[in-house]
Structure formats: C-alpha cells, structure tokens
Image (spheres, rainbow, N blue to C red):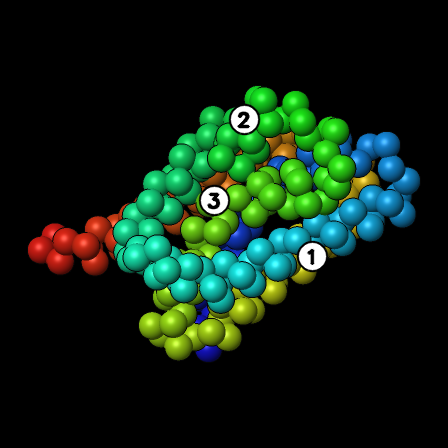
Amino acid sequence: MDFAFAAKVFAALFAIMNPIANLPIFLSLTSGMSEGEQRRTAILVLATVAVGCFVSAVAGQAILGFFGLDVNHFRLAGGLIVLLIALSMLHGEDSATHGGSGAEKATFASASNVAFYPLGIPILMGPGTISALIVYADTAQHTGDYAALAIGILAFLALLGTTLIAGPFIGRVLSPTVMTVTKRLMGMVLAAIAMEMLVASLRALFPGLT
C-alpha cells in the first residue's frame, strides 16, 4: 500500500475542509444548543460528509461519464477551483465556493438542519472537496491502490469527528490566532495540491508539453 498517497489524500481533505478553521462556524451555528445536542449535530455532520466522500469517490467518475466529461478536463477545472479556495485562505478570507455568498450566509442561522446545510454542504462538502475526491479516486483506479485512498479518507473522517464532537472544549482552548495561522498554513498546502492537479491535467491534455 502506498502510504504517501494515503497521506496526500488526508492532507488534501484536511486543507480543503480544515476542521480547525471551520470550528468557529460550527460553534456559532450550534451556540443555542446544549452540549448533547451539539454532539448529535456533530455526528450528523460527520455522517453527511462521510456519505458525500463515499459517493464522490465511488460514483464521481461514473457521473462525469454520464455527462460525457473526461477526468483530465475535470482535474483541470477542479485544480482551478481548489486554487481559488487556497488563495482565499492565504488572504485570511472565507471562500464563497465553500462558505457561501453573503445572501446564502444570511440563511444559515434559520436553516432547519444546520448539520446538513450549511455545515455538511457546502462548507465541508463543497466543490473543492468533491473535485479532489474524484481526482484521487481516478488516481487510485489507475494504480490499484484503493486501500490507500480509503485509509486517507477514513483517517480524515476520524479527525473531523473528533474535532467536532470535542468542539466546545477546543473552542475554549484554541485562540483565534491559532485558527487564523492554521487557515493560512492550509492555504499554502492547498495551493501546492492545486498546482499538482493543474500540472497533471495539462500534461495529460497536452502531451507535447513534456
């Protein structure tokens, strides 16, 4: 099994979904709940993300094929999306791609189930996450290393669940400065991942470049 590939999948999901940087949003949207209700909400968020990851990794390529799209074209588009998210993070801003527009944010507090919307979708399972999972699933298909893909996803889901369930405690311990620094560091990691996706897609689409 390719542990380097598993680590890459984990790093990509951590950088895109960034549980530490998104924890204040979770705490804000669940501020009126008891700790028991917050834990139940965290479990529902985790379930939503787990299902989204499974569908994206297993059925993503089939969905692309249904619309007549090639994975390399999708990898190029996904790389651009991930790069835009990374640039927003580097500037200390929330990407509208995952965080929602101003009009969408105004509806977050009144959502009937914040675990599904907006926490699960689109804040965590947004276009950047889906793009990365489809691209890495295609890589696993060509290398046959499905185990590494599964371990990378499961390791991240374990971290996400732990972070959300322990959210109230972590929120009291971590300072806003730590969360801000984490967002910028993950922005750098995400930018590197985006460039790798862009370069790989360009090489596949234009073999003459290599």
Drawn side of residue 6 relative to residue 84, left or right:
right
| Residue 193 seen in the figure | yes
Task: Tell me the tag on residue 101.
Answer: 2
Mark 3 vs mark 2: which is more N-terminal?
2
**In terms of secondary structure, where does tag 1 sit?**
helix
The answer to whether 152 is drawn above or below residue 176 in the figure is: below
Q: Position of residue 158 (x, y in %)?
A: 67, 60
Query: Residue at the location (50% across, 31% down)?
Result: 95
Query: Residue at the location (53% across, 37% down)?
Result: 98
Q: Quadrant of the C terminus?
A: bottom left
Asked whether the residues under the numbered discs 3 and 1 touch, taking CB atoms below 8 Å apart as contact, a structural biologist would say no
Q: Tell me if mark 2 has few (under 14), some (14-19) or many (20+) residues whose alpha carbon lies within 10 angstroms of its own.
A: few
Mark 3 vs mark 1: which is more N-terminal?
1
Mark 2 vs mark 1: which is more N-terminal?
1
Amino acid type of the residue tagged 1 in the rendering: Ala
- Judging by the rendered image, the residue that carries numbered circle 3 is 127
Query: Residue at the location (46% across, 77% down)?
Result: 1
Amino acid type of the residue tagged 3 in the rendering: Pro
Query: Residue at the location (61% across, 64% down)?
Result: 154
- Judging by the rendered image, the residue that carries numbered circle 1 is 47
